[in-house]
Each structure stands twice: as structure tokens, then as C-alpha cells.
Image (cartoon, helix red, strand yellow):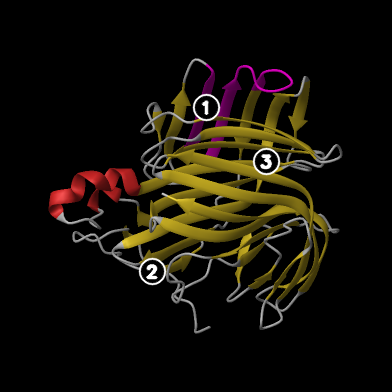
Amino acid sequence: MSEQHRITTPAPLLKADGTLTDAGWSTQPLLDCNLEAAAFYPPLTRFWQKMRIKRWDYYAITTPTHFFSFTISDVGYLGPVFAYVIDFSARKMWEQTINPLFASGVRLARNSDAGESSFMSEKAALTFVAEDGERRLDVRWAGFPEGDLAAQLTISPTPEHESMTIVIPIRGKRFYYNRKINCMPVTGFVEALGQKFELEPESSLASLDWGRGVWEYNSFWVWASASGFLADRRTFGLNLGYGFGDTSAATENAIILDGKVHKLGQVDFKYDNKDFKAPWRMTSPDGRLDLTFTPFLERVAKTEALVLGSQVHQMFGTYNGTAVTDGGETLRIENLIGWAEEHHARW
């Protein structure tokens, strides 16, 4: 593909007419997420825009033995809030979801680098705070399978820690503003499955998928990610994907080594959507990426609610292969635990 455009200047995400100020990628979130300027419907039907704006904060914590995920979202018609736990050795998963109508009780921060996102109900209370360079997660979920769920986590990346941030246009003044932060050090605890798990940054890493935007009603994407350690104990992350929108300005593909983004261009996926558990291949035409992803667990998440529908096949497994940094260093990836998913949405 042609050279990717890097965003370097702070600005509002949207102009007064609802079009994007810029499109491309950056390693930090430079654009203010002024969703109030969205204007993808004619003025007389502008009221319905709120139903089509999608926002979410998805946190994922990878430890040597377990995976913990907590999400607060607002997709207009609903406000899916969910948590799930995966035991790698047992190859088992536990999950619960709450779907408040019209996202009642959901609060989401304007931008990804500061503010509070929260949800509270009789069953669950989740609070995500980004402040003074840290992220604090507080989760309480009564009646979670195998016992109540609780978490208190502090995520403390250095100020220099980079993220894969992308802004892409979608047909008809629609757009996607997304920030993925991999390999962030995390401390604290998670109580789940009748156990208390103490997390330390030497073995546990957090990632964030922060998304804001307006998609076409029928959307599709593939996303692959991981946060872990190389054999020499450097942190290593993946963020790969394709699907919706115009990615001519930039893809979201990158590797993340010790908190620094190494940008990739095109990445080709090969997998069997009739058998998601078969090995996946991710390769780049320029030879910088050559990975095999071998799933060991499938998470299927489905939502059907009148006009809204979603189906996700999220596979957890191990990555093996090679990746080449911007400086030409070849990295060997061995049994790196991560995930890859195919998502169809009607929203």
C-alpha cells in the first residue's frame, strides 16, 4: 500500500460540518473526540444519530494462567456491559453480560487519556478512571459464575508508552476513532472462581481497546491482539485488523515492543470461517510479519434485539512466528497467548 499518513497535530476529531479533520494514525491520541459535531443524518432526522454512535472501553488483562476482561459500552440502542474470565489450563470460560436499554446508567469518558467511565446496577458496578497517567479499574459483580467477581487494578504505563491510534473515514460522514494500548504494567487483584489472583507487572499485562465512531448499519471486521513477553523478557504486543472503512490513509496494524509502536502496512489474514478453531495465518507482503495463530478456546458472543444484532467468534490461542521491527531486528514469537476474532454487527 502507499505510504501511511501519520497525524502529528492536535485538533478536534470532527469539523463543524461533521467531516473528519484528519485521517491516519498516531502513537498518542491527538484528536479531541467531539462527537457532538457528528452530522451523518439530514437535519430533520438528526435525532436518530444518537442511536448510531458507538462507544466502548474494553480492558483485557493477560496473566500466565488466566485472562480477565471488563467492558463498558454504549451502542445507542443498548449499553452492553460485560465481564469474562478464562482459565488457560482448563480451557474454560465464564461470562456475564448486562444490556441496559438505551445504555441507561452507562457513562463513558469523552477521550481516552482522561476521565471516568462507569456503570452501576443492583448486580454490577464498574468504574474505569484515567487520571495522572494511571488507569484504575474497580469492578464488583454479584452472582458471577463460580462466585462473585471483584477487581481492583492499577495500570501504570510510562509517559512514553505508545499506542496504536487510528482515525478512518467510513462512507457517508461516518468514521472510526480507535486507540489500542498494549502491554501496560498492571498491579492489584482479581477475585474470581473462588480464588484471589494477585497481579504483578513482571508477569501480567493490561491492554485497552477504546473505540468511538459511527459504522454502517451492517458492519464486519477481524481483529487480532496479544500482550505478553518475549524470551528475553521484553514486552511484546500485536494489534492487527481489517474490515470496515477506508484504510488508504493508514491501517491499524502494528507490533509493540517495550511500549514502542512499530508500524506495519498491509497484513493478510487466512482462516476458515467454517472452522474457527483451525490455525490462522497472518502475513505481510513485505515480509515483516509471519505468524501462525493456533486457537485453544472459542468465545461466542451473540446479541439479537430487534434492530440490533451482533455475533463475535473470539478465539484464544498462541502465536508463533516472526516479526521485524522498524530498525530491522527480527523478533521470534513463541507461544504468545492472545486472541483473534471475526465480528459481524447489525447496528
Q: Is residue 223 visible?
A: yes
x and y percentages locating residue 180 in the rendered image: 55, 54
x and y percentages locating residue 301 in the rendered image: 60, 42
In space, the residues marked 3 and 2 are separated at their CA atoms by 30 Å
x and y percentages locating residue 303 in the rendered image: 52, 40
- Label whose residue precedes the other's in the sequence (3 or 2): 2
Left or right side of 117 for 174: left
How many residues crowd around disc 1 within 10 Å: few (fewer than 14), some, or many (20 or more)?
Answer: many
In space, the residues marked 2 and 1 are separated at their CA atoms by 32 Å
- Is residue 55 depicted above or below 172 in this figure? above
Provide the residue designation for mark 3. Answer: 61
- Label whose residue precedes the other's in the sequence (3 or 1): 3
- Is residue 335 depicted above or below 151 in this figure? below
Q: Which residue is at 47% across, 55% downward?
A: 178
Q: Amino acid at mark 3?
A: Ile
Q: Is residue 13 magenta?
A: no
Provide the residue designation for mark 2. Answer: 23
How many residues crowd around disc 2 within 10 Å: few (fewer than 14), some, or many (20 or more)?
Answer: many
Provide the residue designation for mark 1. Answer: 126
The span shown in magenta is 123-149
Q: Which residue is at 47% across, 31% downward?
A: 99
User: Which type of secondary structure does the marked residue at label 3 adopt?
Assistant: strand
Q: Which residue is at 70% across, 77% downward?
A: 288
